[in-house]
Image (cartoon, grey):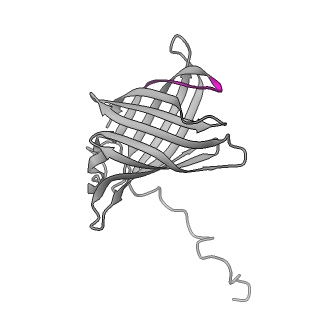
């Protein structure tokens, strides 16, 4: 006993653990059952891929391709992951583009049922995290920033506005951004088709 460190946590020398035991799915036919609070967001669950156009007063316009994965693990929130790549005039990949991860979650009422209000947390690897509040109207989602948090080296982003919609089976979205001294200005828009889910 005298050689043991009383401050040593019990897990320090524990054996390795198995892989994460809970399934997450972007396909409603497999994996956990979708939480009832997510029924209004069900059309978004899946993997989406398509093209878009971007620009801002401080950069040249650009074309891009994008893949968005929206999945769930049975709890009352969705996982959102986006990765994009820049395209040249012949639609060939030029370089990686923006990446983003986040969480969408419906606001629940006192009985645990989903309202049409939403909360979303979105983060990019360049040091910006946006907290959005939003509303769902049918298959349309509208988000506005409630708060923006930046690292000391991130570019100045002060606000955002995003629209998502399912239109004729496609995922359409538009994103406005207020950054580097400019007010809310169109930044990205795209049309993506479901490739899985």
Residue 63 position (above or below residue 132): above
- Tell which residue pokes out farthest to the front in this image: 183
Name the residue: 74% across, 84% down.
3
Give the position of the N terminus as an image quadrant.
bottom right
- Residue 45 at x, y percent in the picture: 33, 42
**Is residue 109 visible in the rendered structure shown here?**
yes
Q: Which residues are magenta?
A: 50-59
Out of 14 and 172, give the one closest to the viewer: 172
- Tell which residue pokes out farthest to the bottom in this image: 2
Residue 118 position (above or below residue 173): below
**Is residue 76 visible in the rendered structure shown here?**
no
Name the residue: 27% across, 47% down.
40
Please, what is the dominant secondary structure of the magenta stretch?
strand
Residue 106 position (above or below residue 157): below
Out of 160 and 166, give the one closest to the viewer: 160
Quadrant of the image occupied by residue 22: bottom left
Q: Is residue 188 left or right of residue 96?
A: left
Q: Is residue 173 left or right of residue 114?
A: right
Tell me if residue 45 is in the magenta stretch: no
- Residue 135 at x, y percent in the picture: 36, 47
Q: Is residue 193 left or right of residue 176?
A: left
Residue 148 position (above or below residue 61): below
């Amino acid at each position: 006993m005298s050689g043991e460190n009383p401050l040593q946590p019990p897990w320090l020398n524990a054996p390795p653990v198995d892989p994460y035991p809970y399934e997450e799915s972007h396909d409603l036919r497999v994996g956990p059952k979708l939480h009832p609070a997510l029924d209004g967001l069900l059309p978004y669950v899946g993997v989406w891929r398509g093209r878009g156009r971007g620009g801002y007063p401080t950069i040249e316009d650009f074309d891009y391709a994008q893949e968005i994965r929206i999945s769930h693990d049975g709890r009352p929130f969705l996982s959102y992951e986006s990765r994009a790549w820049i395209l040249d005039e012949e639609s060939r990949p030029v370089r990686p583009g923006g990446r983003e991860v986040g969480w969408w979650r419906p606001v629940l009422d006192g009985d645990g049922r989903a309202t049409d209000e939403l909360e979303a947390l979105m983060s990019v690897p360049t040091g910006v995290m946006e907290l959005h509040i939003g509303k769902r109207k049918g298959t349309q989602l509208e988000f506005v920033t409630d708060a923006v948090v930046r690292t000391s080296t991130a570019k100045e982003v002060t606000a955002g506005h995003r629209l998502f919609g399912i239109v004729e089976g496609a995922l359409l979205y538009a994103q406005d951004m207020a950054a580097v001294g400019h007010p809310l200005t169109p930044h990205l828009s795209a049309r993506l088709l479901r490739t899985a889910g």
